[in-house]
Amino acid sequence: MKQTMVVKVTMSDEKSRSKALKVVVGFSGVESASLKGDDKSQIEVTGDGVDAVQLTSRLRKSVGHAELVSVSAVGGEKKEEAKEPPAAYVWPYNQPLYVYQELPYAHQQDPCSIM
């Protein structure tokens, strides 16, 4: 599911902004990232299957204080698919859990090899 999230990060200079964008773009599933807001302290991230909590915690570890502002699904055309019912699966309930087989011993009278 494609989603857009806004993360507010404490960034004071260009170096920290650049570092934050590198961290966000390097995260798996991110398709685009952009700076947003009056002081460019918010990062808008668009991606597919991005975990917002992991992204925020990674920004906290590398840049500084980060706060998740919003997460929303990207509005797109919803396709109505005719879902087929799953194939019926018959579980073999009467099967034994294990099969006991008697192994042939070389010496039927004395199965212990130590004696």
Image: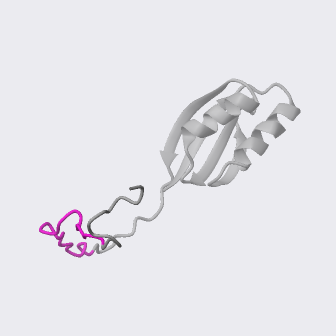
Q: Residue at x 62, y 39 (%)?
A: 55
Q: Is residue 112 left or right of residue 95?
A: right
Name the spot of residue 10 as percent of width and height, x first.
73, 25
Q: Residue at x 59, y 38 (%)?
A: 54
Magenta run includes residue 3: no
Task: Note whether residue 61 is visible.
Answer: yes
Name the spot of residue 75 as percent of width and height, x first.
48, 56
Q: Is residue 113 left or right of residue 36?
A: left
Task: Note whether residue 7 is visible.
Answer: no
Quadrant in the rendering for residue 91: bottom left
Name the spot of residue 67 as percent of width and height, x first.
61, 28
Quadrant of the rendering where the C terminus is positioned = bottom left
Majority secondary structure of the magenta segment? loop
Q: Is residue 39 left or right of residue 5?
A: right
Which of these two is toward me, 110 or 69?
110
Rendered position, 106 above or below 11: below
Taking the view exactly as shown, the residue that stands out farthest to the front is 115
**Which contiguous range is marked in magenta?**
84-103
Q: Residue at x 74, y 42 (%)?
A: 23
Which of these two is toward me, 32 or 86?
86
